[in-house]
Image: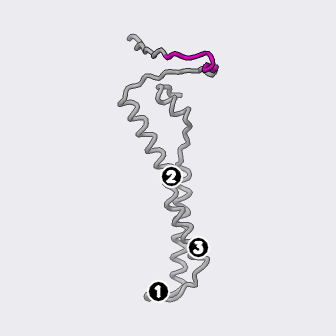
Amino acid sequence: MSTPKVELATIPVSPDDIYTNLQIGVIVVSEDKLVRILEKDRERIKRNVAWTAPASFFISLIVTILTTDFKNKWGMPAETWQALFYVATAISALFIIIFCFKVKKKSIDDLIKEIKGNKE
């Protein structure tokens, strides 16, 4: 299988406009493969921010617990309301911990390696 030839345009440049930071790499990849890689990375990013919903719920519950004087309401004693809020706070804290352990970090270099086809 022959490698594809890439032709680069010739651009007139004056000597004053030349700088020496020229590490150029060209990646040739099909559009459908690039779309699949970027879609997978976008899904990873969505999963990485999933902890924000339980975190905001947790903060709201903590503020409620710290500032509220629980009272008997709708046939439930104050202690039951307080226990309900404590349980909800613990559950949301558990979800935050679970989601934080599922965070997958990936650098730009890792994404470029995946686009290049390196499986390192």
Q: Nearest to the eye among marks 2 and 1: give it.
A: 2
Work out whether residue 41 or residue 74 is closer to the camera in this orientation and state it. Answer: 41
Q: Whole-percent x and y of residue 22?
A: 60, 20
Q: Image quadrant for the N terminus?
A: top left
Q: Whole-percent x and y of residue 71?
A: 53, 87
Residue type marked 3 = Val
Dot 2 corresponds to which residue?
49
Dot 3 corresponds to which residue?
63
Name the residue located 53 percent from the left edge and 75 percent from the top edge.
85
Q: Nearest to the eye among marks 1 and 3: give it.
A: 3
Distance, label 1 to label 3, CA atoms, is 21 Å
Q: Image quadrant for the C terminus?
A: top right
Residue type marked 2 = Val
Dot 1 corresponds to which residue?
76
Residue 5, image quadrant: top left
Name the residue located 51 percent from the left edge and 30 percent from the top edge.
112
Examine the rendered structure and indicate whether residue 85 appears above or below residue 91: below
Q: Residues within 10 Å of mark 2 (few under 14, many from 20)?
A: few
